[in-house]
Image (tube, rainbow, N blue to C red):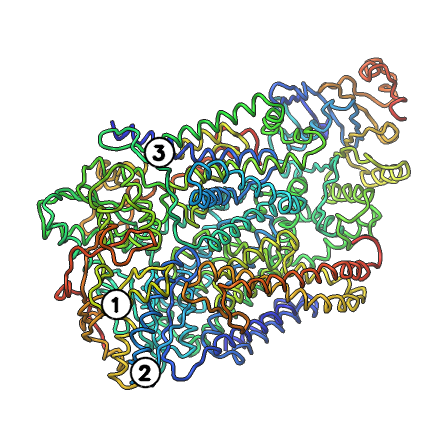
Amino acid sequence: MALFLVNILDGLVTGLLLFMLCSGLTLIFSMMGVLNFAHASFYMLGAYFAYQISTVTGFWMGLLVAPVIVGVIGALIERYGLRRVHKYGHVPELIFTFGLALLIEEVVQFFWGKSQMAYSEPLALDFAAFSIAGNSFPAYKVFMIFMAMGLFLVLLYILTKTRIGMTIQAALSYPETVQNLGHNVPLVFMCVFGVGTAMAGLAGVIAGPVLGTFPGMALQLGSIVFVTIVIGGLGSLWGALVASLIIGWLQTFAAAYNVAMEDILTAIGFTKPENIWDHPLQDLWTLTLPQIGPILPYLLMVFVLVLRPQGLMGKRET
Amino acid sequence: MTIASKTPLTAGTKRLISLSTVLPWAFAALFLLILPVVFQTSSALTIMNQMAITIVFALSYNMLLGQGGMLSFGHAVYMGIGGFFAMHVLNMVEYQGLWLPLPLLPIIGGMFGMLFAFIIGSFSTRRAGTVFAMISLGVGELIAACSIIIVVFFGGEEGISGDRTMGPEFFGMDFASQSEVYYLTVVWLMIAAILMYLFSRTPIGRIANAVRDNEERAEFLGYSQRNVRWISFIVSGFFAGVAGSLFAVNFEILTEENLNLATSGSILLITFLGGVGFFIGPIIGAIVFTLLQTVLGLYTEIWSLYLGILFVASVMFFPGGFAGVIAMHRRPLSLGKLHLLTGPYLKVAIPAVTSILSLAAVLEILFHKRHGFAGDGAMSLYGITFDSHGYQALGLAIVIAAISLFLVSRITPEIKAAWDEANHAGDDQ
Amino acid sequence: MTAPALELRDLSKSFGLAKIIQGVDLKVAKGERHAIIGPNGAGKSTLFNLITGKYAPTSGGVYLHGENVSGLKPFEINRRGLSRSFQITNIFPNMTVFENIRCGLLWTMGYKYSFWHMISGQQDVTEKAEEILEQINLTSRRDLLAGTLAYAEQRALEIGITIAGGADIILLDEPCAGMSHSETALIVDLIRKVTEDKTLMIVEHDMGVIFDLADKISVLVYGEIIESDVPDAVRASVKVKEAYLGTTLEDEGV
Amino acid sequence: MNKFKTLLVGAVVASLAATAAMAQEKVRIAFIDPLSGPFASTGNQGLSIYRHAVDELVNKKGALLNGSAEFEIVPFDNKISAKESLIQLQVAIDQGIRFIAQGASSGVANAITDAVKKHNKRNPDKQVIFLNHSAVDPALTNDKCNFWHFRFDANADIKMDALTDDIANNPDIKKVYVIGQDYSFGKAVAAAAVRFLKEKRPDIEIVGNELHPIGKVKDFTPYARKVIAAEADAVITGNWGGDMVGLGKAIMGAGFTKPIYTYYGATSGITANFGDQGDGIVKLAGAGQVNPPLSAEAEAFTTSYYEKFPELDLGQPQMANVAPMLAVAINEVGNADDVKAIAYALEGMEFDGVLTGKTIMRESDHQAIQTLTVQGQTSEGLTFDYDKSGHGMVAETIVELASLNSATTCKMKRP
């Protein structure tokens, strides 16, 4: 039971982190119709910038400054790159962001090399906040939960209480209303892209010390982020939240419990073959839940898309 | 012998089409035949084989992206599946005495590629655009991940290997030497390329274009957009499987790498760089990419950075890829005004090349400064050796780059004017 | 008596709470030219989209020659002999004019999903396509990309694609929208020519066109048919005048 | 038409490139490892050690054919791809290179050993030797052994033998948790751990034995929770790269303060990432040692290495043996062309490794037998630190000629 509780908390951390990425991606998608393949790359940039800043001024400055830099870079990319491609249609846009993801990874390697950076949590948070049955829960993770929650609340406030937020919300359900933003649609697009990427950058700043700051971090998380917003429903913020939490818990619990296929097969009446390593079904017999944990989100996505193409809470099909 | 039997076949299939269509193919076949006479080393043959395989794969990918409007992030799956099955069949030939001449292996791989495309296409082709792209990504990741888990079939991390020479001899060839494999590969390259070209000329091939352009309209002409995409997808799966089998024959090993996102991504890159709107595009893309990868890779560590820059620049400025740039000159050519462009082109060539080389030098020097060995500041670039840690070399490169870029920017209006002039015959272009 | 070519029985469509089409009943006899008119937002395009299968009806049914086709996909309805054009030009912009027409022909000429025919070798298709090009006066534009045509030519091409398949029921959605008077006259002639012996249903704002072409006119207001009769009777109808908020049909543009 | 022109130009360039590097009195070794991409740090580290060993231990001493020849290391980037490795192998052979060195990833090593075997059979006039400096899958010197393959690193079994000796001598350890990456190497480590522990300390309970997907786990926290919940006294893992950092940080972050036994728990950013937390916890079993230096020569060798490559680490000491041992074999044969004779000369060779002590290339399976150490991470008493972090590894247990008589299933077929 104690372990279950710990896993709930760990899954929550993973899920909320995922949500920080997904919310920015969803915002961008809702407003601009662009599925930003490079979104996780901005997350990576956030972590690297924060690391670089932290070597000079410490963690907290990085937390403040890095997301801003990432946001500015994002806005510039929208202004001088994406906008140019926009006229060719959505598929070239997707290809552009895909190329951007490749390029950002190369640029990061160019400047920081290939090894993992020694980016770690601030000393002030480097202690165990509490522990459950010997398992300590780092203070930093508590901080992560509060940061993600805080971001969510700010976002919720903006979306429900401000004019721009209302328009964005309308755009979630009715893409045509984007045109009613007034005369400066391009500026709004640029800002949305900047804010969305800054949120990804913030996620990177926070996740870097825990999940590692290395050139593969974008790729590792990238496809999961798309999977999440597709499962949640493209353009649905609540869907993104729900899907993020589902995937966070799914992955945590899949890794946490060693459910073995062997036990299941024996329980339903099959007998394990004598010499398992020569058996054609050896892989089935030796399968465990942690082994397939990382592919569960993809499996879930395929099911969702086949059964409910608009996603769990999505209102529109693409 | 294979060759002799191939040429009449080429001619036969194309008889109903004009000479101008047959000629490039015949020329290509001849060229491929004499290529190994010029480049005899087995590494040159290996690289040419790899190009041939990449061309088949890229053409099959372009059936989706270029002709069907389907952006796939998981096309490696069908090539890989075809290759893995081909490899298992190869091992059955070796260990269970199955009788199968090696040149027929690609048919088997193709069939399995097709089978998987049939199954996965049944649900993924319902929609084009973003949803298709996402499903292809998901399925791609899924199967790549499964390949590590299902060791019996995929061989886990180390993959599965085989020996191509164990089958029955084929007209006296046992395919131990690279050159025999080369001929097998290019014969299949020709067959596959011709078939794919012909496919684009069939009713379904044209309707695939129509669905790409305007799926709603196609539906109101009696065509189910899903079925049209599905059929393209299946046919594309077949040729991807053929490419996979050729891979199995050439490298005698298949690993997870043949299925993963990186491979799927690079075929997108190759096809797009070459030009998705043109049949020849993926062919150009495959050749350029293979050369960049093998040759540039020999000279610089940051070759993939250059590739990334090239790709992003291409998406932004030349969405038609290399083939598109070439095709842009078709109109001046037909107007007989191509000569108007040669002057400005020649004029810009030197500063343009200089600026590219000097910008690359800036990157190389920066990279060397940052990641080179500390005691080892010596660096040689374009045949010049210097100390990368001082500021002279870097400064010089930056100055040269700035000057040449300035020159390029000065000449640009002239090119633009010449371009407008060369295209000016009737209305807008 | 044979079944009407097209019949709508108590057809309704809602989007969420908004009822766009509310219980439409309509019969279009074979060979009839039937026009739908109504103020903006009356649901004319939605009605077309319901008939052609783009949307599934919330309730009620669409019958083609007596067969219930509601809920079928657009391509299935098309194969049963109904073809439509679009309000916004809807052609294949990256294909040539000739190819646009040819795409409209392939299914009904039996090539379907064929990958064993070389398309350029099929004389029958080529000839038929040329013939249609001739009809819509685009022979001189044969090998241009459709996207590069002038607007009026694109509208003509749109009609050409629509009728190419030889469907016996043709739905035209504002074929003359955005055209000058002379262009409109040309298109109306074209429509008359290509829909001979066919059942035609047309939505159009230009009342001149309507009263010129139509055998019967139905007036759609807020998702309901308030009148369906021959042109003269519609012109005289009080209900219709009220629906157009006091304006007369003449003011609308005749 | 353009297709042809491009292809022609390209092929000219390719074949020029293939012949460009021709040199006369150099004996060239092709170093095929990842030099770009995510695993480049591993490849570049290996390359630096090779270069340093060739300079200091062979060329400067004139140790190759009495100074009439020199070694040259020719790097080839295989991008850690099996396909790319085979292409580079082919390019190297075409350039006339007869000595192929590779080590990063057992998967690639498997592909190369297989390709070398086929190549030597098909081209008896151009035979090559495969010098495996760090791929440790036991199969390579057991079921899949072949005459042309020589392994200079201790294989996974040998390392586990040394590692479990250390565990066996620690009476505090009663429960062990084994975790690794889900592929051949990870499975080999797990199997060896179970086998040796059962043999040496049957009283130790293995409280966890599991595999996780390789390179796919973003967050190792759930695994760390299981380790804590199982109340393990020690963890054994074969993880490397990002999976090592992730697992190590998660386990220590969850409050684990007992030893973590690793194969690759140092250098390439790992030591820097573990930092203070890893001191006294992270252990590593490997061939040879850097701290404390074995001899004055070793210290000089290491010092000059760090002068030359301050950004890198001498993380794989056995790599320094490859070129010197090859030189001895070539000297014995008298030329660098009779590859088969050189392979025979390498078999059974006894050698004094600068960082690995007495080293024997076992004849029966071409497995190097050398000094193995179990090292512990610390920040005190270091002659050389890793990652410029102030932390490093110091040999705690030293086993000379480890596993000299271990069994092998290799049935060597000699030409």
C157 in relation to A148, above or below = below
Q: Amino acid at mark 3?
A: Leu
For the point 88% across and 26% down, which residue is it?
Answer: C253
Q: CA distance from mark 2 to mark 1?
A: 20 Å
Q: Nearer the viewer, residue A317 or B206?
A: A317
Image mark 2: chain: D
Question: x, y percentage for residue A137?
Answer: 30, 32
Q: Quadrant of residue B259?
A: bottom left
| Residue A161, image x, y percentages | 57, 21
Q: Are marks 2 and 3 in contact (CB under 8 Å)?
A: no
Per the rendering, the mark at residue D151 is 1
Q: Earlier in the sequence, mark 2 or mark 1?
A: 1
Secondary structure beneath dot 2 equals loop
Tell me the subunit letter for badge 3.
A
How crowded pointer 3 is (Cα within 10 Å; few <14, some 14-19, many 20+) is rated as some
Chain identity of mark 1: D
Report x, y in % for residue A77. 60, 45
Q: CA distance from mark 2 to mark 3?
A: 60 Å
Q: Amino acid at mark 2?
A: Ala
Q: Which residue is mark 2?
A: D336
Q: Which mark is residue A125?
A: 3
Nearer to us in this view, B300 or A255 = B300
Residue placed most toward the observer, D267 or C142: D267
How many numbered markers are drawn?
3
Residue at 35% over, 44% down: D217
Q: Are marks 2 and 3 on the same chain?
A: no
Amino acid type of the residue that numbered disc 1 sits on in the rendered structure: Arg
